[in-house]
Amino acid sequence: MVGSIEVDVMSDKLNGKVVPLPEEFDPIAMISDPLPPQVVENGGIVDDEAEDKQNREIVLGKNVHTMCLAVTEPDADDEVTGEREAYMASVLARYRRSLIERTKHHLGYPYNLDFDYGALAQLQHFSINNLGDPFIESNYGVHSRQFEVGVLDWFARLWELEKNEYWGYITNCGTEGNLHGILVGREVFPDGILYASRESHYSVFKAARMYRMECIKVETLASGEIDCTDFKAKLLPNKDKPSIVNVNIGTTVKGAVDDLDLVIKTLEDTGFTHDRFYIHCDGALFGLMIPFVKRAPKVTFKKPIGSVSVSGHKFVGCPMPCGVQITRLEHINALSRNVEYLASRDATIMGSRNGHAPIFLWYTLNRKGYRGFQKEVQKCLRNAHYLKDRLRSAGIGAMLNELSSTVVFERPQDEEFVRRWQLACQGSIAHVVVMPNITVEKLDDFLNELIGKRSTWFQDGKSQPPCIAADVGKENCACVMHK
Ligand SMILES: *Cc1c(COP(=O)(O)O)cnc(C)c1O
């Protein structure tokens, strides 16, 4: 094999074989042989070994490729016959129909699926990339920094940080915001210990592993909030090291809001002065809802916090994953490096950044504004209460945190039902996150189906509704012992 070509292999996931490129690889030659093996439409491969492999796949139950739409090589005359174009168009049309159907029956993930970005379709012809620092123009001109900075300004104002005191960027998701916030904390306090409640999002613990930080898990209350008594007990033996704390503005599973004020007070009472701790607020889910909820602890940079992040595809409703990260400008200098190749500064986690996302965010912020979000939040909270009340009156264990629109309830016994409504489950519980696209009619459809099916799951008396007291507290459980 020719030296440099050895690494140029095509991995054929369908049959696990690795297909090397032709030995005498001439980059400008026309290749006439079809490279990958022949595939049929459902992804099955026409040879014996494949059947073998498919059996094994079922045994393993993971890495399933049977649903995949294989990439097939064009035939020489495809351009003439137009067959390939027609095939691809039919695949896309079918896919579109399934998206419409799956969007209709989605309840479990905190994504607002109600939006219309038709006006932005004209932009899909451009490769918009905001690589580098949002505030320092790079040499790549096809960017959307003007939208990005506009969106960042809006969020900085929401969280009460002056224009000349904040730094931030549009991330690729909430996880990237957490990775960034915790990294800033680590750079400010290289020997700091990371504290996070055990119900924090998995990305927080991923950050700890990636950065090889010492990480202490703090217990939670039944609501899912951080337990500050346990927090204090865990801080006390570690007073010699600075604290980096992840505070949840809405946990993933129960929608619990950590009490930011109590976390700060606990740190202060334990002897941590403001120059000895860094707080990152993970507002992926609820960061844009909480400003509109009365009684909720206020998320603001007037308090001693270091960063806040929020996902853009959750409550805001962007059609692609994205997020917003805001931190204090003073911290970012500890982290950034100048990069000549970009003619910009490197202070982000990712390199290339989705330049379309800020435009979608900008579009929605402009359309809805502060008032629009407020209305939507109120609607979500109302509908979440409706769902919880109906579940409870049907004898189904359920919990709804006061500040949240995440309704936690008994995990349905039927996996098919769980898949149909795309419920997120953990152990004995499942949840519905009531987003602006979830109407009362949709909830009624779901409830009627659930109540109907449930009566068949338990009718012969062989199985009982699960006890969820350990997850949500006795008072929210409806099992035989607690109802
Ligand atoms: C969804 C979520 C994240 C991660 O956000 P992604 O955008 O999915 O990466 C982080 N924290 C919480 C609390 C979340 O709900």
Image (tube, rainbow, N blue to C red):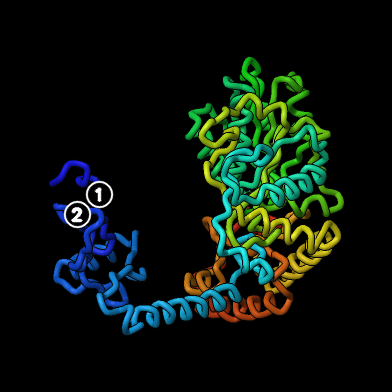
Asked if residue 142 is positioned above or below residue 92 in the image, the reply reads above
Asked if residue 15 is positioned above or below residue 170 in the image, the reply reads below
Residue 463 image position (x, y, % from top left): 50, 70
Q: Residues within 10 Å of mark 2 (few under 14, many from 20)?
A: some
Mark 2 or mark 1, which is nearer the start of the sequence?
1
Residue 136 image position (x, y, % from top left): 66, 37
Assess mark 1: CB under 8 A from ligand 1? Answer: no
Q: Is residue 188 visible?
A: yes
Residue 204 image position (x, y, % from top left): 57, 40
- Tell whether label 2 touches label 1 (CB within 8 Å): yes
The residue closer to the viewer here, 432 or 8, is: 8
Residue 202, quarter of the rendered image? top right
Residue 170 image position (x, y, % from top left): 64, 47
Judging from the image, what secondary structure is the residue with disc 2 in? strand
The residue closer to the viewer here, 440 or 331, is: 331
Q: Can residue 222 be seen in this view?
A: no
Q: How many labels does the image show?
A: 2
Judging from the image, what secondary structure is the residue with disc 1 in? loop
Q: Residues within 10 Å of mark 1 (few under 14, many from 20)?
A: few
| Mark 1 to mark 2 CA distance (whole Å) | 7 Å
Q: Is residue 322 left or right of residue 262?
A: left
Taking the spot 78% from the left edge, 30% from the top edge, the residue there is 304
Q: Name the residue under label 2.
A: 20
The amino acid sitting under disc 1 is Asp
Taking the spot 33% from the left edge, 65% from the top edge, the residue there is 65
Taking the spot 46% from the left edge, 80% from the top edge, the residue there is 94
Asked if residue 177 is positioned above or below residue 36 in the image, the reply reads above
Mark carried by residue 8: 1
| Quadrant placement of the C terminus | bottom right
Q: Which residue lies furthest to the top in this view?
A: 240
The amino acid sitting under disc 2 is Pro
